[in-house]
Each structure stands twice: as structure tokens, then as C-alpha cells.
Amino acid sequence: MKPAFNKILVANRGEIAVRIIRAARELGLQTVAIYSDADAESLAVQMADEAVHIGPARASKSYLNVDAVLEAAAKSGAGAIHPGYGFLSENADFAERIEAAGLVFVGPTPHAIRTMGDKAAARAAAMRAGVPTVPGSVGVVADADEAAALAEDIGYPIMIKASAGGGGRGIRIAHDESELRLQFATATAEAKAAFGNGEVYLERFIRRARHIEVQVLGDGQRAVHCFERECSLQRRRQKVWEEAPCAVISEQTRAELCESALRLANAVSYRGAGTLEYLYDDDSREFFFIEMNTRIQVEHPITEMVTGIDLVKEMIRIALGFPLSLKQDDIRLQGTAIEVRINAENAAKGFIPSPGLVTHVVVPGGPGVRFDSMLIPGYRVPAYYDSLLGKLIVHDRDRPSALARMRCALSELRVEGIDTTIELHQALSVDAAVAKADFHTGFLEAWLETHPLARIAPAAAELSVPVSATFTAEKEVA
């Protein structure tokens, strides 16, 4: 079979651009990086075979500029575009423009992006496929009167969610009708401003929920799942710490959860990598589908570690026109993997961003340790984009061993010149509740109110796994 392309343009930046370039090179493909004024010296630009400047630092003038991205593809002769995550990755119009230009979009079809990227449409598709969903509206809600009538049947508290939202954004919670009416107007205005689409829908708010998601791969004809991840440790609905697999669900629940994800992926003839997200009610032990991310996820490495599957390479192979090479029986779950997000933020000072010059980097090593990042000494972290610097990932035979490995890796990891969230993860890694996987989506925000980040060592004494004395947090260089 003749490959559909031999050169791929990465329509992104930062650590995911580096990740895609590495995968493409292993497949023997040439790579093209795009960059804004702020990213001219980035690692992705240095690694790629070619690099094309696409505009000023602001994302709206560069990474979100469809015309500029397509012009870069034409200029470089790239035959395919991989969008990574964020930016244009779930933009169906962008995917259509790519295909209209005779190029390959490394991802789902525009139709699948529209169906599953729109949360209200995705809920309706899940219901048709027999996948359990959180009690709520079947589709978008027209106005506050309709919302109030529906809420009587759904029950309070209730979430008003932007249909085109993502990344935990575009959500409001109401506890009674008066609050619902007030929040409805605010939610629709915010959705319109943030996503260009003011449509919203309703879901019951589950008070003690875990955020669990299932990774799928499909070639448009059939799909497989790669088991689940838990992403319950969140701040302002932004994931901070992720694990694979979930430590608390039964094997029967795992099987039912993953099977439901497969039903939905096959129902929409899904192509590429995608993630179906669920809420798991700790009290009732039920799971409910909430949305699908029609792209590669930030936390994909932990799935790769527990299955041995390179998800990015599989995405590219499918885009090249090859059928899915994996059978469900071939995919095994082995051990536990944990990922922590290293952000350029000062967690002790309200998570204020910390752009600036990185003066020194020490990357941890050893068996089962991985650091996906774009960091190099001398790199200046720009103030224009997401604060994610990289992800520290560990894998071991079971969860206690993986936690011990994470503690050691965090004690080795150093990023000097800017503030980072390393200290936050050091503190979480020795917390007694985290050690028992006794958390939910509201856990971290409550934890932050009572746990000064400087007090790391005392919690270590409560753990059964020895913790090195080197866990005293080091002061970051200003």
C-alpha cells in the first residue's frame, strides 16, 4: 500500500509538538514545525526537518489562524496536518479546510468532530447507543423557562454546561430555581464569548464524583479501547494528576465502562484517537458518559505506559490509510502509571503564571520514568499560552510502587529560573488520602485550602512506603 503522505506538519507547539515530531520520525516521515514570534527558539522548531513562521505571538494571529497554517502546509509541501490538542484540534471547519486542500487531517472525520465535539449532540448519540448519561436535558436548552421546567424533573444541584465548551470551561452550577435563572443568562453569555456558541444544556451535579475516561482508537470501520484513566485530581476543572487504571473500580465495572465506550465509538464510525469521559458516582457505583474529546489527550502517556501502545504513532498510521492493526484481545493492562502536569505556575501564591527564562533543567531517569517536555536550558517560557511545561510520567507493577517511583522522580526533577508546580506534586505524592486513592473531583480544591505546600515531610510518616528525606521543597530561583 502506498502511503498517503511522507511529510507531516504539526499544527501546535510545546510538548505535544515535540511528541508528534518524535512519533513521525520513528515512522520515517519528514516533519514540519510551525512557530509564532514567541516560539522561534523552541525545541520543536529545533527538532523538525523544517520550520515555518506563521505570525505574531498571540495565538489568534498564529496557531489559531487557519489560513496561516494552511499556507505553511502548502509552502512546505506537507501532505498531512496533525493538530495535537487544544488550538484547532477539535475544529471541524479546520478539518474540512484541510481535506478540501487535498491534505490529510490526522484525526477524526469532520462529521465525527461535530457530532461528538458538541456536548449536547454527543449526549444524544450516547443515549441512542445505549450508553448511560448523567440525568439532564436531551439536547440544548432554549431559555431559562425551559431550563427551570427541566430542572424540576432532573433535580438540584444542576450544571449549566456550554455545548461547545471544553477543558472544564463553560460550566455553572445552580442549587435552586432562582440561582438557575440567574446563572442561565451568565452561562449563555460566557459560552458565546468563549466558544462563539451560546448554546447550553443541563446535567445533574454529582456531589462526589470521580472523573474517569476511556481511550479508544478506531479506523472508521472498527474501534478498540485501551482501558481507562482516572483524572479526578483537578483544580478549577483543569486536570493536575492522572492515573491509569482507576484504582477503585471493580473488574466488572471496568469491563462495562470500556464496552460502553466501544459502542459509542463504533456508533459514530470513529477514526483516530479519542477519549470518552465519564463521571463515576462513588456512592451509587454508577458511571455516566459526559463528553468525548475527539483528539489526543494531554494524559495519553499513562495509557501508553500500561498498554505498551504508542497512541500517536497509531493515529498517524491510521491517517496514512492503514487499517487498525490492534485487536481487542491483544491489548493488556499491565501495572499502574501516574502522570503529573508540570506547569509554569506558583501554587503557593494562587497559581500565578511564571513565564521567564529557564536557566537549568535536570530530568529524572531510571526504569519506568518518562518526561514529556519541550524544556531546555536557555528557553524562555512565553506568557501567551497555556502554562504546561511538560508531564512527568512513571510506571510500575502496582499503584504503591508507582507512587514510590513518582516521589523519587519528583525529588530528581529540577526546573530553575521560573516557578513550577513540582512542589505541589511532591506534597500530593506523600498525602495519605492520595496514597489510598481516596479522592474525587472536588478533593484538590479543598485540600489546597488546608495544606500549606511547604509542609511536605510530615505527611510522609503516615505512609507505609518509605519516603526519602530529600522531599524538603527547594526554593525556586526567582
Image: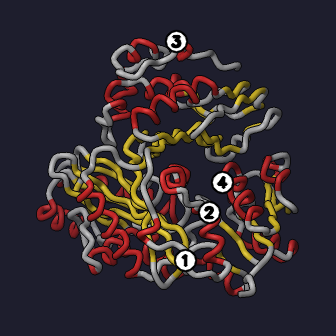
- Residue 198 coordinates in the image, percent (x, y): 43, 66
Give the alpha-carbon distance from disc 1 to disc 4, as whole Å: 23 Å
Check the image and report above or below for 89 versus 110.
above
Check the image and report above or below for 370 versus 154.
above
- Residue 434 coordinates in the image, percent (x, y): 36, 31
Q: Earlier in the sequence, mark 3 or mark 1?
A: 1
Q: Secondary structure at mark 4?
A: helix
Give the alpha-carbon distance from disc 3 to disc 2, as whole Å: 38 Å
Q: Are marks 3 and 4 in contact (CB under 8 Å)?
A: no
Between residue 108 and residue 30, name the one nearer to us: 30
Single out the mark in the foreground, 1 or 4: 1
Q: Say which amino acid is labelled 1.
A: Leu
Single out the mark in the foreground, 3 or 4: 3
User: Mark 1 packing: few (<14 Cα in 10 Å), some, or many (20+)?
Assistant: many
Q: Earlier in the sequence, mark 4 or mark 2?
A: 4
Q: Which residue is mark 1?
A: 324
Residue furthest left in the image: 153
Q: Which residue is mark 2?
A: 312
Q: Earlier in the sequence, mark 1 or mark 2?
A: 2
Q: Which residue is mark 3?
A: 469
Q: Which residue is mark 4?
A: 16
Check the image and report above or below for 455 versus 362.
above
